[in-house]
């Protein structure tokens, strides 16, 4: 199992946006997403009707890039992993509470179990740079 070191965890807790890559019919699909680090997994909220969700239903392997670009001081973590879909239950409730506390857009447009899922990305590979 891939684990994040303390500096990587701190970096991930202070960033809100990432780019999620999925694939359909050998065609890559990349989009910006909000995320949180929970335990050793990256959690993303999505909707059922998105291309990303449809892709993950067919192929749970994803890539996600989390970075801050500053010339001469670029920091990033790129992760490849497997995705578990969380739609209901205690884990959904816990993740929803975390998203509700962190993101104003969740508080503005709340949802319930089975209305929109979370994607739990379990890292299989990672690389980071600029995070000392």
Image (tube, rainbow, N blue to C red):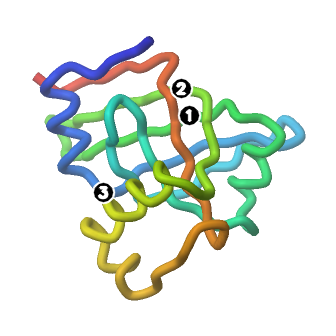
Q: Residue at x 44, y 60 (%)?
A: 93
- Label for residue 90? none
Q: Residue at x 26, y 46 (%)?
A: 69
Q: Residues within 10 Å of mark 2 (few under 14, many from 20)?
A: some
Tell me residue 59's x, y (percent). Answer: 78, 35
Question: In which quadrant is the C terminus drawn?
Answer: top left
Alpha-carbon span between mark 2 and mark 3:
18 Å
- The answer to the question of whether label 1 and label 2 lie on touching residues, with beta carbons closer than 8 A, is yes
Residue 66 vs residue 35, the one in the foreground: 35
Q: Is residue 20 above or below residue 5?
A: below
Which residue is denoted by mark 2 in the rendering? 80
Mark 1 or mark 3: whose residue is earlier in sequence: 3
Residue at disc 2, secondary structure? strand
- Label for residue 63? 1
Residue 35 vs residue 20, the one in the foreground: 35
- In the rendered structure, the answer to whether residue 130 lies left or right of residue 65 reads left
Which residue appears farthest toward the top when viewing the image? 1
- In the rendered structure, the answer to whether residue 50 lies left or right of residue 13 reads right
Which residue is denoted by mark 3 in the rendering? 16
Q: Is residue 16 above or below residue 42?
A: below
- In the rendered structure, the answer to whether residue 109 lies left or right of residue 4 reads right
Residue 103 vs residue 110, the one in the foreground: 110
Question: In which quadrant is the N terminus drawn?
Answer: top left
Alpha-carbon span between mark 1 and mark 2:
4 Å
């Amino acid at each position: 199992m891939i684990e994040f070191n303390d500096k990587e965890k701190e970096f991930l807790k202070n960033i809100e946006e990432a780019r999620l890559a999925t694939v359909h019919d050998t065609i890559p699909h990349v989009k910006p997403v909000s995320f949180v680090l929970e335990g050793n997994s990256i959690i993303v909220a999505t909707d059922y009707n998105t291309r990303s969700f449809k892709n993950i239903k067919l192929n749970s392997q994803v890539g996600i890039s989390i970075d801050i670009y500053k010339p001469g001081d670029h920091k990033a973590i790129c992760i490849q992993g497997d995705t578990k879909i969380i739609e209901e239950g205690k884990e959904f409730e816990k993740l929803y509470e975390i998203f509700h506390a962190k993101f104003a857009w969740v508080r503005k447009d709340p949802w319930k179990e089975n209305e929109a899922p979370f994607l739990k990305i379990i890292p299989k590979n990672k690389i980071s740079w600029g995070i000392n």
